[in-house]
């Protein structure tokens, strides 16, 4: 085993934030290296501060290191300054745990959380000394793998990555490790890389792009067929049936330098069935699997004791929907556990599930700012996207929070949604102003920050057929909001650069032809594209033009039902007919309830996999489809505001 530490130590003094590269965090592991083991380099393709808190990576790090035959270490993308010196001095990508060079690992695996990190993936592969494209690699090169939400359309990266994992990684990483271990230890195996890839493709949830033939139809749409009999025609995602069996991370890492989300994170449930039509995370992670409140408490208790954190985040896609949320918050802030010194943050809150009870329970401990995501400015628009939050829901939650001591509030919105009019867009400013007015009743310092992002249609959502707004149109909408909020006291507007939105759009529904574009952008220096100071749309436009690919074709046009989609060979558990019906219902403003508490409408996520929702409490939380926080106060029942769809889909799985 070698280490690049002596060379690195010499140069760390010359770079910004050297603590990014030294490891030594509480909870970090330095596995003993054994050539017979399968060594994973779990790599987050962005800078350390952003990648460090990633829970998926920390979970897999622990699971592999618990195996007798596995070793896992971590790597992050080196920042521009260090990369320049590494290239000058021929220092390869390395693990932060033992500073072992990346090319000594059996697998370099990436977490793909956003399309804008793709060029960083290429950069890390190259820095690792691994040939860039899968077909150029030999049996002696590490395997390159990837997991995370972007793998639901991995085609733009398919030329660079040997295998993708779809869905929950907890079980599949052990199966991958055993398969690679068996291949390594079989002395009769001819040690062909292709043979190993074939073995991997037999694992459920694993997609090996090199085993598929790519062709085009007469309209230029990508078609894909297995060219190897072992590769499945459709790769189904993996879903762990019971989150309770996976109480990870048990040993959350504690950084020695500043990172984002620096707190204890305890995942209270996975999956979401609210059915917001723009939300890929909600669709692809179905069904809901909750931990018991007892396990949440145990994880919080042991986490606090071990890490010394004074902030706990109860994480999920929509934490206030956890069926025992008030009890979970109460137990987390319980004096016997935290001596009154621990604050709780609930990072993903639906306003219609933010109850007086939750606000009251959080009261009394240090309170951080609250974030709500109404997503759209008008009730009409929220019906289209199936985020069925009324203005009363929002104002009620805001009043609850301000009345109980909060001073700052952040509201997230999307612009460029299907059927959006200027009236819908300007509704965002009105909502924000009204929230600020409510706050001023309680404090003159009340502040409401409105954060606006351009909508990017994602695979496996009902909006996957929608033609995205152009950058010009998104910028016009941002300008409308700038004008409308300019004079509003207590309201601040922030927005994402619409130019970055178009690149996300190209990649999110892109195909393999984009490999050349990614390589061009990377070769021209386009890394860290998530960082506004490094993002440059011109690099992308030029690369698209050079390869005769049209931005309009990839992003701005609506798709027909019959059009083959680049992810048709993958299965996120949802029937394509269900998604199409949801798309049509969106245009008709027909809503659909949360199936956690209503009869199943057969989207495919449970029925197709023979699993079901797992909930901690047998009764729905207030704010579930049975009522809102206001119902408690008013003693009334929420009026039925939506048309409930009932249908059976069956048909082709997507
Ligand atoms: S299969 Fe039924 S119960 Fe499960 S997420 Fe889909 S609609 Fe809900």
Image (spheres, rainbow, N blue to C red):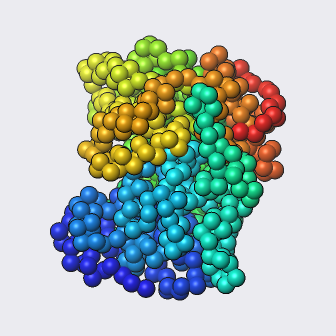
Residue occupying image coordinates x 51% and y 52%: 159
Rendered position, 309 above or below 372: below
Residue 197, horizontal then vertical, whole percent:
63, 64
Residue 380 visible, this angle: yes
Viewer-proximal residue, 206 or 53? Answer: 206
**Residue depicted at x 68% and y 31%:** 579
In the rendered image, the vertical position of residue 253 relative to residue 333, given as above or below: below
Quarter holding residue 341: bottom left
Residue 621 shows up from this direction:
no
Taking the view exactly as shown, the residue that stands out farthest to the left is 14
The tally of labels here is: 0
Q: Quadrant for the N terminus, please.
A: bottom left
Observer-nearest residue: 545 or 364?
A: 545
Residue appearing at x 67%, y 72% in the figure: 179
Q: Position of residue 560 (x, y in %)?
A: 63, 23
31, 330: nearer the viewer: 31
Q: Is residue 594 left or right of residue 413?
A: right
Place of residue 139 in the rendered image (x, y in percent of width and height, measured from the top left): 55, 72
Screen quadrant of the C terminus:
top right
Left or right: 598 in relation to 333:
right
Please name the residue shown 62% across and 60% down the image. Answer: 169
Residue 477 sits in which quadrant?
A: top left
């Amino acid at each position: 085993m070698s280490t690049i530490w002596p060379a690195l130590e010499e140069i760390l003094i010359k770079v910004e934030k050297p603590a990014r590269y030294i490891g030594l965090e509480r909870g970090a592991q330095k596995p003993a290296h054994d050539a017979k083991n399968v060594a994973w380099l779990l790599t987050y393709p962005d800078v350390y501060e952003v990648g460090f808190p990633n829970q998926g990576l920390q979970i897999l790090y622990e699971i592999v290191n618990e195996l007798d035959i596995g070793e896992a270490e971590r790597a992050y993308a080196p920042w521009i300054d260090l990369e320049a010196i590494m290239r000058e001095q021929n220092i390869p990508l390395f693990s932060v745990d033992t500073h072992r060079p990346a090319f000594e690992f059996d697998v370099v695996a990436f977490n793909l959380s956003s399309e804008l990190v793709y060029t960083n993936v290429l950069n890390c592969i190259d820095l690792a000394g691994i040939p860039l494209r899968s077909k150029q690699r030999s049996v002696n090169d590490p395997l390159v793998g990837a997991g995370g939400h972007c793998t639901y359309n991995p085609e733009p990266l398919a030329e660079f990555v040997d295998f993708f994992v779809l869905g929950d990684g907890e079980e599949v990483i052990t199966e991958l490790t055993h398969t690679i271990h068996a291949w390594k230890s079989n002395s009769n195996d001819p040690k062909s890389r292709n043979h190993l890839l074939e073995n991997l493709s037999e694992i459920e949830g694993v997609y090996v792009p090199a085993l598929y033939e790519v062709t085009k139809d007469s309209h230029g749409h990508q078609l894909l067929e297995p060219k190897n009999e072992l590769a499945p025609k459709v790769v189904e995602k993996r879903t762990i049936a019971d989150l309770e069996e996976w109480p990870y991370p048990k040993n959350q890492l504690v950084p020695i330098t500043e990172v984002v989300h620096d707190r204890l994170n305890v995942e209270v449930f996975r999956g979401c069935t609210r059915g917001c039509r723009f939300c890929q995370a909600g669709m692809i992670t179905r069904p809901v699997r909750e931990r018991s409140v007892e396990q949440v408490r145990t994880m919080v208790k042991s986490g606090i004791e071990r890490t010394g954190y004074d902030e706990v985040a109860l994480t999920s896609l929509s934490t206030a929907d956890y069926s025992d949320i008030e009890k979970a918050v109460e137990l987390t802030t319980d004096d016997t556990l935290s001596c009154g010194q621990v604050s709780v943050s609930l990072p993903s809150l639906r306003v219609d599930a933010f109850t007086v009870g939750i606000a009251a329970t959080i009261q009394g401990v240090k309170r951080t700012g609250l974030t709500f995501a109404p997503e759209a400015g008008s009730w009409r628009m929220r019906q289209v996207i199936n985020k069925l939050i009324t203005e009363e829901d929002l104002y009620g939650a805001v009043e609850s929070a301000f009345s109980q001591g909060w001073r700052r509030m952040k509201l997230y919105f999307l612009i460029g949604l299907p059927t959006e009019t200027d009236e819908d867009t300007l509704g965002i400013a009105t909502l924000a102003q009204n929230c600020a007015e409510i706050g001023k009743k309680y404090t003159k310092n009340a502040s409401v920050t409105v954060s606006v992002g351009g909508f990017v249609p994602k695979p496996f959502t009902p909006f996957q057929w929608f033609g995205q707004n152009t950058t010009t149109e998104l910028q016009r909408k941002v300008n409308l909001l700038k004008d409308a909020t300019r004079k509003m006291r207590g309201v601040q507007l922030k927005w994402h650069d619409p130019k970055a939105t178009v690149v996300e759009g190209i990649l999110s529904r892109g195909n393999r032809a984009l490999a050349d574009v990614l390589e061009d952008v990377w070769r021209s220096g386009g890394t860290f594209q998530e960082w506004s100071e490094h993002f440059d749309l011109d690099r992308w436009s030029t690369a698209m033009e050079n390869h005769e690919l049209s931005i309009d074709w990839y992003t701005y046009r609506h798709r027909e039902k019959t059009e083959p989609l680049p992810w048709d060979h993958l299965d996120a558990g949802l029937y394509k007919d269900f998604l199409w019906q949801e798309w049509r219902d969106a245009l008709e403003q027909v809503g659909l309830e949360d199936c956690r508490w209503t009869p199943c409408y057969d989207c495919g996520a449970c029925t197709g996999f023979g699993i079901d929702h797992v909930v901690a409490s047998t009764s729905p939380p207030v704010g579930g489809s049975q009522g809102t926080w206001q119902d408690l106060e008013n003693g009334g029942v929420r009026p039925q505001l939506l048309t409930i769809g009932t249908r059976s889909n069956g048909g082709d799985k997507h």
